[in-house]
Image (cartoon, rainbow, N blue to C red):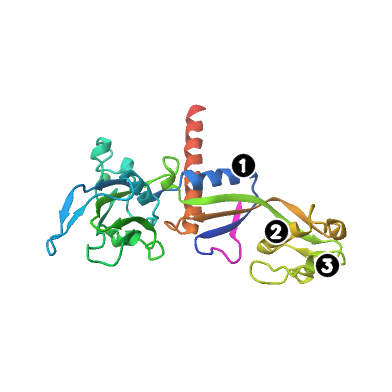
Amino acid sequence: MKASVVDGYPQGNKMKILIEDADASQINALRRAIIADVPKMAIDKVMFTLGVNQDNNRGEIFESVNALPDEVIAHRLAMIPIPTCPENSIVAPNDCPNCMDMAEDDRGCPMCQVLYTLNVQGPSADSDEPYRVVRAGDLTNVSDPTFDISAEMQPIPITYLAQGQFLEFIAFATLGRGRDHAKWSAASAVTFQPRYEAELKKPKKASVLFDLDLKTSDGRAIDAKLFSNKKCNDVSTVLDLEKALHQVGHGTGRDTDFDEAIVLNKVDGSFVFSFETDGSLAPEAVFNSAIEELKSRFSDLGDDLGRAFA
Ligand SMILES: [Zn+2]
């Protein structure tokens, strides 16, 4: 199996990888490993402060009532991407040398969890603001600064607070895997498709497509210049051509004139693999981690088989 990043990627958290010398089942194993097996940080436990607070300066009363139930806030917190560096020394609570032998409720130490606090009050009674939005950026990280919520994720809204309301909690993030809960899934839209090469068979009839003035995703005109020796095998360009061909396909009224002037030929054993991370991990790290997960699984399987047949 050979893997290479498609030109122009990663784009932010999006990744496209060309995989050659592989079959669909191997790529699907990789897809499943990315969804379910790559470890990632997410908020797993939240302890809310309930009650009434008095603002000492003004004597104003704030109550821990909220537009959203605590469960919904906890769910929204779980979905906030927590920076996860593979080099971080954080381990999953089940693998933590301090906690692995404890009851589940007692687990949690600096080696296996990251702490965030939040304490926000709604607008004061004489304020013109009717409400205040609580955002991911209001979370204060009290552990290693590498786990600070990234600037890109800070505007994520969590809830609204009206006058006289406050929200206070401690949240614990742990390392987990997507197979246990979707909040620990490192990437979404994990897909693959066969790789195609485009062939310009009838240059004159292809003008039905070229005259539509369509553009590729990087802004080049879709015309005969995309082909050299009547072939186009650049991965991104072929994907753009594939999309453009829908404009001259069956049901468009142009298909008779176009007459399959451009055809897509499948490249055996070659796939375009794509996914987008939630921002907790870099796309390269997700891919490498999935490969490592598969490697260790198959070497374990190999050992087991070796033992079984010994
Ligand atoms: Zn621990």
> Which residue is at the front of the view, 280 or 255?
255
- Distance of mark 2 from mark 1, alpha carbons? 26 Å
Name the residue located 77 percent from the left edge and 67 percent from the top edge. 212
State which tag comes first along the sequence, 3 or 2.
Answer: 3
- In the rendered image, residue 262, in percent from the top left (x then y), is placed at 81, 60
Q: Which one is closest to the eye, mark 1 or mark 3?
A: 3
Q: Is residue 103 above or below residue 193?
A: above
> Which residue is at the front of the view, 55 or 303?
55
- Distance of mark 1 from mark 3, alpha carbons? 39 Å
Name the residue located 42 percent from the left edge and 56 percent from the top edge. 280
- In the rendered image, residue 282, in percent from the top left (x then y), is placed at 46, 59
- In the rendered image, residue 247, in percent from the top left (x then y), is placed at 75, 59
Q: Is residue 137 above or below residue 266?
A: below
Q: Is residue 222 above or below residue 184?
A: below
To which residue does mark 2 refer?
243
**Quick one: label 3, few (<14), some, or many (20+) residues within 10 Å?**
some
Q: Main secondary structure of the magenta part?
A: loop
Highlighted range, magenta: 1-10
